[in-house]
Image: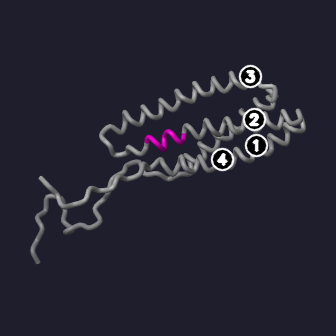
Amino acid sequence: MTSNEAPAPKAAATSNPVFRRALIWGAIATAVIAVVGGAIGYAVAGSNGLFSALAGAALAFVFMGLTAGTILLANRWTGDQLFAPIFFAVVLGGWLLKLVLFIIVLIVLRGAPWIQPQVFFFAVVASVVTSLAIDAIAMIRTRAPYVDVALPTEVAEDTAPGEKPTAD
């Protein structure tokens, strides 16, 4: 039962381009929100407003990136027999980590003297809403196949099902 054929390389998950695109557009949107939010925050509350807007935008991007990153990491096991349990363990573990980190970050930033709460809140909300819109647009615009099946490239003979090939 040995074979001289090399094992076929694992195909990448069809969802990978969606999450890569979401990460790239998320980074661009975060930069725009940081600049615009920072300018508005500075105009409203001085340097504390600037730092609050930057922190809010960065926080939202880190957590959005963790979601897409854990899915991209879990997709490395595509085609493996244990893909489903590994995928869900990695993704759910990432979400649990995000929840714990988010609570810790909010507790730490709660008493920070350089945080202006309203500017921070609006920067986080703007970043999250933008991130959700980007994720939705990336999903809608991506054309991904429903099945990962390799079709034969060549047919030996063109015969109807059940018909015996004829010798010419």
| Mark nearer the N terminus (3 vs 2) | 3
Q: Quick one: label 3, few (<14), some, or many (20+) residues within 10 Å?
A: few
Q: Quick one: label 2, few (<14), some, or many (20+) residues within 10 Å?
A: many
Q: CA distance from mark 3 to mark 4?
A: 25 Å
**Residue at the disc numbered 3:** 110
- The residue depicted at 79 percent of the width and 45 percent of the height is 35
Q: Residues at badges 3 and 2 in contact (C-beta under 8 Å)?
A: no
Counting from the top left corner in percent of width and height, residue 113 is at 81, 25
| Mark nearer the N terminus (3 vs 1) | 1
Residue 85 vertical position relative to residue 134 in the rendered view, above or below: above
Find the magenta span and give its range: 68-74
Residue 134's image quarter? top right
**Residue at the disc numbered 2:** 123
Which kind of residue does numbered mark 4 sit on? Ala
**Residue at the disc numbered 4:** 27
Q: CA distance from mark 3 to mark 2?
A: 15 Å
Q: Quadrant of the C terminus?
A: bottom left
- The residue depicted at 38 percent of the width and 35 percent of the height is 86
Tell which tag, 3 or 2, sits nearer the viewer. Answer: 3
Counting from the top left corner in percent of width and height, residue 65 is at 59, 41
**Residue at the disc numbered 1:** 34
| Mark nearer the N terminus (3 vs 4) | 4
Q: Residues at badges 2 and 4 in contact (C-beta under 8 Å)?
A: no
Tell which tag, 3 or 1, sits nearer the viewer. Answer: 3
Q: Quick one: label 4, few (<14), some, or many (20+) residues within 10 Å?
A: some
Which kind of residue does numbered mark 2 sit on? Ala
Which kind of residue does numbered mark 3 sit on? Arg
Color theme of the render = one colour
Q: How many marks?
A: 4
Magenta region includes residue 91? no
